[in-house]
Image (spheres, rainbow, N blue to C red):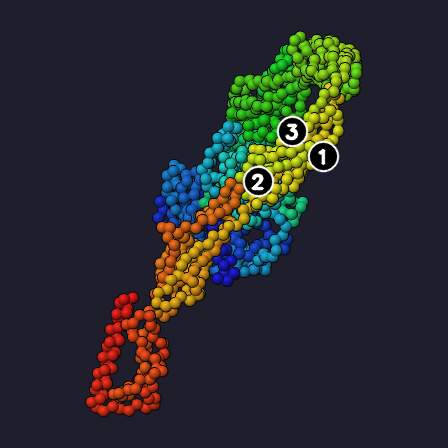
Amino acid sequence: MSKSKALNMLSKFSALAFAILGLASVLIGIVKADNPVSKELTQVITGIDLLDASDTKQNVSSEGDFSLRTNLAYKLRVTFDLKQYNENLNNGDYFTFDIPAPMTVYNGNQELIDPVTQVAIGEAVVTSNGNDQGGKAKITLKNLDKYLAKTGGDKVKDVFGNFSASFRFLKDQNKTPINFNSSSMKQEIKHVYSSKTISGPKVGTENYAKAGGQASRDNWTSEKLAAIGSVSKGDAVSNWRVRVNTEKQDFGQNIVLHDTIPNDDTSYTPAQYIPETLRVYRADITGGTSAVPDDAVLLSEGKEYTVDWNENYTSFDITFKDGTTSYFVTYSTTTPNDGTKVANIAALSLADGTKLAQNTSRPGALSMKAEATSLISGTIVASTAYQIKINKTDAFTLAPVPGAVYTVTATDDASETTEVTTNEKGVALTKTYDQKWEGKTFKIKEKTAPAGYKLDEKEYTVKLGAAGSTINLKDEPVPAVFNVTAKKVVEGRTDKLPKADEFTFNLYTAENLKTPVATAKSKADGTITFENIELKGAGTYRYIIKEDTSKAIDGITFDEEGKEVTVTAAFQGGVLKASVTSAEPTFTNTYKAAPTNATIKATKKIIGKELVADAYTFELKEKDAVVATANNTASGEVVFKVTYTEAGEHTYTITEKAGTEAGVTYSTESHTVKVNVVDNGQGQLVATVEDADAERVFTNIYTAPVPTATSATLEFTKELTGRALVDGEFQFELYEGTKLVDTKTNQAGKVTFKAINYDAEGVHTYTVKEVNAGATGITYDTEKTAVVTVTKDAATNALKATVEYPAGSVFTNSFKAPAVEATIEATKKLEGKELAADAYTFELKENGAVVAETKNTAEGKVAFVRSFEEAGTHTYTLIEKVGTEEGIEYDKTEHTVTVTVVADGQGLLTATVSYADGKAVVFTNKYTVPNPTPDPNPTPNPTPNPNPTPDPNSTPDPDPNKPGEKEEPNPTPPATETKGKAELPKTGEATSIFSAIGFVVLALSGLVFFVKRKA
C-alpha cells in the first residue's frame, strides 16, 4: 500500500469517528402527532457553521476564507427553524441538505433527543457520494406522539435545532468557493475554503498540551460537589485530556500541573471539575496522542502524585514526584449542553515555581487554553434568536441562582429597556427584539439580588446577534462566618502554657494541604482562634489544622500531627449559617531546655621526676557517686566536663585516685567545688562554677627504685617439607658476633635457646645458623638473625628486653627422596631351534598402557629396569609380543608382577619386586620345521644303476629317525642327476614311477600330520 493510500485510509477512519460524534440538535415546535401525511419541509435551514474536532467554531481569515488542514476531519453544524410549520408537523416529515464537492463526507446517523423526556423526536442520516463528491443529509421527524404523551400536551411551539455532518478535504484547496443552495435553505450560503497538507520537521519541543472539551452523554454524581452545595449530578459532561512532559525531559522532581476553569470570563459557561473523574497515567506519548494509550499505567494518588483542589473545585494542582517521565491526565467537568462555550487552561511549572512554555518554539506561551462548544448531538436547545440570555450562577457553588432581577437597556436608546428575572434554572430571557437591533450593544445590570446574595454592582455589555446572545454572570453569596478554635499545651513548663504569639498554626481544607485558608497564633492562655472564616455554600466541610514547624523554637518539640475539624453549613431563614461540629483539638508541644556543660579544673604536680600525660586519675564526686573522671595532661592540667539536663545546685569533691606506680607517694588532698545550673527561659540551661579559677593542687612525690635486670629467650620454629620432622635431627648454633653462645636441636617443631640475661640498656644482634649435616635428600636453610633491645622504664628503672626477628623466625628445610630402581626379570626359552639374541620382544604394561619394551638376550634373559621417586605399589602385566616368524608358536601367557616402593623413617625409598605365586616368569616358544614347497617342474629320477659303485667322498642321507642328525636345508643332488630336458619313460616304467611318487607324497603327508599333532 502506498503512503498516500495509507494516509487516505487513516483519515477516513478518523473522520468516521467524528461523524459518529457529530452534533444534531432539535427544538420541538408545534406538532400534531396524529397527522398521517408526511411531507418535505423547505426553506428551513437558517445557518451553517464550521467546527473543528473539539466542536469549536472556526472563523474566516482576514482574506475571507476558512483555513483548514488537508486530511483532517471538520464538521458542518447546520441550524434549522421549523416555525413556519407550526401545528403542521407529522412523523415522517423531512428535509434534506446537500453537501457539495470536493468535500469528502462521512456516513453517519444521529438521533435527535429531547433532554427532558429523553424521546428521540428525529433522526439525521448523512450519506457520502464518494471521495471528493460531497454527500447528502436527510432529517426525518419521528416519535412526536410519544413526546406529546410524555409532556401531557397536544402541541408545542417553535421547533429550532441543528445537526452536523463530518467531512474532510483529501486534496489541498486554494480559496475554493462552495455554495450551499438546496431547497431546504432559506437562502444560499457561500463559504470559501483553503486546505493545506502540513509536513516537515518537528518544530520545538512540546512540554505539555491540553485538548478536548467535547460534550458527551454520561450520567454522573459527585459526593465532593454535593458536600459544598454544588450541583452534584447530571447527564452530560465535557471531557478533557492533558499531555505532560511529552518528550520525557528531565525536569527533576515534583513538577506541578496547574489546571483552571476560567469562570471569571463571561464568554464561557461556568463549570466545575467532577473530582471523582480525575485519572493520571504514566504513558509513552507523542504530540499526536489524544486518547489513553493501551499500555498506559494508571497511577495511585498519594504514591506517584498528589492533588490539591481549591475550595470549590474550579482549579487543581497535580504534583508529579518523578519529573523525568511522561504522563496522560484525563478528567471531566460539568457542562450545560446548550451550545455555549466552555474552556480550560493548563500550565506546567518546576518545583521552584518556574513556569515552562507550552512548546519551546514559543517561549512566551506559559499556559494553554482549550475551548469547545457544549452541545451534544441530538440535544434540543431553545431558540434565542434576537434575544439576550442571562445565565446566572452562584459564584462559589456554580449552582443556578433564581430570582435575580436585571435591567437590560440599549446603549443607543435608554428608552429601550426591560427587566428580566432568572428562573429556577438561573436563566433569564429578554423579549425578542426587532431585527433592527442586531449588532447593537445593550447594558446589563443587576437590580435586585436574591436573598443570601450580594448585589453585583458591575455593569456588563453585550452585542445582540441574529441567533441571540448569551452572557454568563455570577452572584457572590453572602458567606456564613464562623471561628475555628483549638488549644495549645506545652509539657515541660510549670504552667503548661505557651507564650503569647509563640506558636503559629495554619488552617487548610482537607482537599488542599498546600495553601492555607487562614493563619492564627497561640495566645498566652493556650487558645488558638481562626477568626472570620467564610463559607459560601451549604454542606459539610473538612478542615485540617497544622502547626507551623518551619522555624525551630529553642527547647520545643512540635506536635506535627494534623488535627481535623468538621464544619456544617446550612440555610436558616434564607441565611447561610455555619458551625463547627467536631471536638476542639489540642496540640501538645514539649519543652525541654537544651543541655549545658560545666568545666571544673584542678592542677597536678609531682616532685622527683617529670610529669607524664595521663599518668594519674582524678574523680569528681557528688556525695558518694562518681560523676566524672579525668587524667592529667603533661602540663599538669586536670579538666572535668560535666553535662547538665536539668536546672539545680550541685556540690562536688575532687580527689586523686591512688595508683600502684612504684616509687610514687600519692596525694590525699580533697577539694570542694559548687556548680549552679539555671534555665535561661529561652530553651537553654546555663551552668556557673563557683571560684572557677581556683588552682586546686594535687602533689605527688616520686622516689626512684633500684634498677632490675631482665632476660630474653630466643626461639625459632623448625619446619620440614617432604616428610615428617624428627625431633633432634637438626642442630642450630647461636652466635653474638663470632662468639658461640648456645647450641640446640629441634624439639616439637621449635628451637629454643637458653635465656640470656641483661643488666643494662642496649641493642644485641644474634645470628642463628643451622648445621648442614649433609643428610641424604635434605636441602638446608641457612641462617636467621635476632635483635634484642633492652630498655629501661623511667618510672621504675626496670629493664625490659624486646626481641625482633628481621627476617622471620622460621627455619624451613625440604626433603626429596632419591629415586630407587627395580629390575623386573623373565626368562625366554625356545624349543625346536637355537635361541638368538633380540629375536623376541616383550612389553611391560601398567593399567593397560605399555610403559616399557625390551628384547631377549642370546642366553634367554629378559629384563626391565624401572625408576621410582615416590612410595607406592605398581602392578604390571608382562607379555611377549606375538611376532610373524615362520614356524614359531609364541607363548601368549600374561604374567603379573608387583613392585612395592616404601619409604623408611628417613624418607629413603626401597623397591621390592614380587611375581605371581612367587614363581619366576618364563616365556617358552616352540619351533616346527616348515613343510618344503613342491617344485612345480620336478626333474624325473634317472634309471638307477643296478650295481652302483659307492662314492667314498659322498655324504650319506640322514636317517630321519636317528636323533641328533640335522637335515641340510639345501641337500646336494646325486651325482647321477641329469640337468636339462627330461626324457619320457616307457609306458611300463612311467606307471611304476608315478606309483612310487604317489606313495612318497602320501607318506610325507602322513609325516607332516604326525608332526603337527605332536606339536
Q: Nearer the viewer, mark 1 or mark 3?
A: 1
Three-letter amino acid code at the position of disc 3: Lys
Q: Which residue is mark 3?
A: 754
Q: Residues within 10 Å of mark 2 (few under 14, many from 20)?
A: some
Spot occupied by residue 732 in the image (x, y as percentages of width and height): 64, 36
- C-alpha span from label 2 to label 3: 23 Å
Three-letter amino acid code at the position of disc 2: Leu
Front one among 466 and 355 = 355
Q: Which residue is mark 1?
A: 739
Comes first in the chain, label 1 or label 3:
1
Q: Residue at x 56, y 60 (%)?
A: 172
- C-alpha span from label 2 to label 1: 28 Å
Q: Which residue is mark 2?
A: 720
Q: Quadrant of residue 983?
A: bottom left
Q: In the structure shown, which secondary structural element does the residue marked by tag 2 occupy?
A: strand
Q: Residue at x 55, y 46 (%)?
A: 816
Q: Nearer the viewer, mark 2 or mark 1?
A: 1
Comes first in the chain, label 2 or label 3:
2
Spot occupied by residue 242 in the image (x, y as percentages of width and height): 55, 43
Q: Residue at x 38, y 44 (%)?
A: 143
From the viewer's perspective, is 366 left or right of 332? right
Q: Is residue 521 visible?
A: no
Q: Is residue 287 above or below residue 834?
A: above
Q: Is residue 985 visible?
A: yes
Quadrant of the snapshot with the C terminus: bottom left
Q: In the structure shown, which secondary structural element does the residue marked by tag 3 occupy?
A: loop
